[in-house]
Image: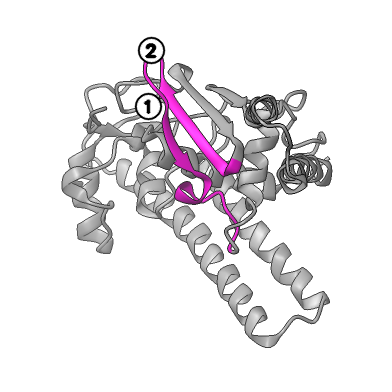
């Protein structure tokens, strides 16, 4: 699947790329997302202080807060600077793109020149810019769409991915950032994916919090690693249904267990327990976010 490089970009897409934020869920703004990452970091640091965590752990969490705060403010200042630049009538390197309409679009090269000249900032890999610039607002930059994708969750923490009419490519949870540090149980993102595959609502309650926004943003990165697709893998958030995948997501673990039981005279206790643990963790994750 060949990626294409867009020739134009919106103000928000440009700023997001400059501060290395490659995904903004549909219906949310850049400022809301950087604020969510900052809030999540602040909450974790505050809770660690209340728990009287070790000094080294507190220092690491405080550094995370400082970095998230700096990125949040940097995004705001860069956005303001670019808006001010657009108000200039002369002596500005920024050029409007031919496809500008209701939403102002800028020529990509002119934005790159402006950011480099004014601030010494660059997009990642300027010469081979990833197509997910358009993906920031839900339009995939490669020759496939999320609606054409099927993802299966298999036993033993394996994933299958295929495009419409194709064959499944198998990956491991660990390959795409869905396993915990001990590498024997899925991390929170892996549990979230399992929960979504089971048809569970995320978040479970009616209140959307910062941790929910950051979780869906992190899960999107894992799905991009799995599939290579940019763009928006989730339908727009709504209170009634939460976030639902645009792609077909299937929990195939129980089918694998049933097939194994039919082939075997005896099923070891540990094998059955694995599935129970996975289901319990997925339910517990959803319950905690209700």
Establish if 270 lies above or below 64. Answer: above
Q: Nearer the viewer, mark 2 or mark 1?
A: 2
Q: Which residue is mark 1?
A: 140
Q: Which mark is residue 220?
A: none
Q: Residue 201: percent from the left, percent from the top? A: 74, 30
Q: Residue at x 35, y 36 (%)?
A: 132
Q: Residue at x 64, y 27 (%)?
A: 263
Q: Residue at x 42, y 26 (%)?
A: 168
Whether 238 is among the magenta residues is: no
- Count the labels in the image: 2
Residue 138 visible here:
no
Q: Residue 84: percent from the left, percent from the top? A: 36, 48
Q: Residue 179: percent from the left, percent from the top? A: 57, 53
Whether 175 is among the magenta residues is: yes
Nearer the observer, 128 or 284: 284
Q: Which residues are magenta?
A: 156-181
Alpha carbon separation for disc pair 2 and 1: 19 Å
User: Cβ–Cβ below 8 Å for labels 2 and 1?
Assistant: no
Secondary element type, mark 1: loop
Quadrant where the image shows the N terminus: top left
Residue 158 visible here:
yes
Establish if 166 lies above or below 37. Answer: above
Q: Which mark is residue 165?
A: 2
Name which quarter of the figure residue 163 lies in.
top left
């Amino acid at each position: 699947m060949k990626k294409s490089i867009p020739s134009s970009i919106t103000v928000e897409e440009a700023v997001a790329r400059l501060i290395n934020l490659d995904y903004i869920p549909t219906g949310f703004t850049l400022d809301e997302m950087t604020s969510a990452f900052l809030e999540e970091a602040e909450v974790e640091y505050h809770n660690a202080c209340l728990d009287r965590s070790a000094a080294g752990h507190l220092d690491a969490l405080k550094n995370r807060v400082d970095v998230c705060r700096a990125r949040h403010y940097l995004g705001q200042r860069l956005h303001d600077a670019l808006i001010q630049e657009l108000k200039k009538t002369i002596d500005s390197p920024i050029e409007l793109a031919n496809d500008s309409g209701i939403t102002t679009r800028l020529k990509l090269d002119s934005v790159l020149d402006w950011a480099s000249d004014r601030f010494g900032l660059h997009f990642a890999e300027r010469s081979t810019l990833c197509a997910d610039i358009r993906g920031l607002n839900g339009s995939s930059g490669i020759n496939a769409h999320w609606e054409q994708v099927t993802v299966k969750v298999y036993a033993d923490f394996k994933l299958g991915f295929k495009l419409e009419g194709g064959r499944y490519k198998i990956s491991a949870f660990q390959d795409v950032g869905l396993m915990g540090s001990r590498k024997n149980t899925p991390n929170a993102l892996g549990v979230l994916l399992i929960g979504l595959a089971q048809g569970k609502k995320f978040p479970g309650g009616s209140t959307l919090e910062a941790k929910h926004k950051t979780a869906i943003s992190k899960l999107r990165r894992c799905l991009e690693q799995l599939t290579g697709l940019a763009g928006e893998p989730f339908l727009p958030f709504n209170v009634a249904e939460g976030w639902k995948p645009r792609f077909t997501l299937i929990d195939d673990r129980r089918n694998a267990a049933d097939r194994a039981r039919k082939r075997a005279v005896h099923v070891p206790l540990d094998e059955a327990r694995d599935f129970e643990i996975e289901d319990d963790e997925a339910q517990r994750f959803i319950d905690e976010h209700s």
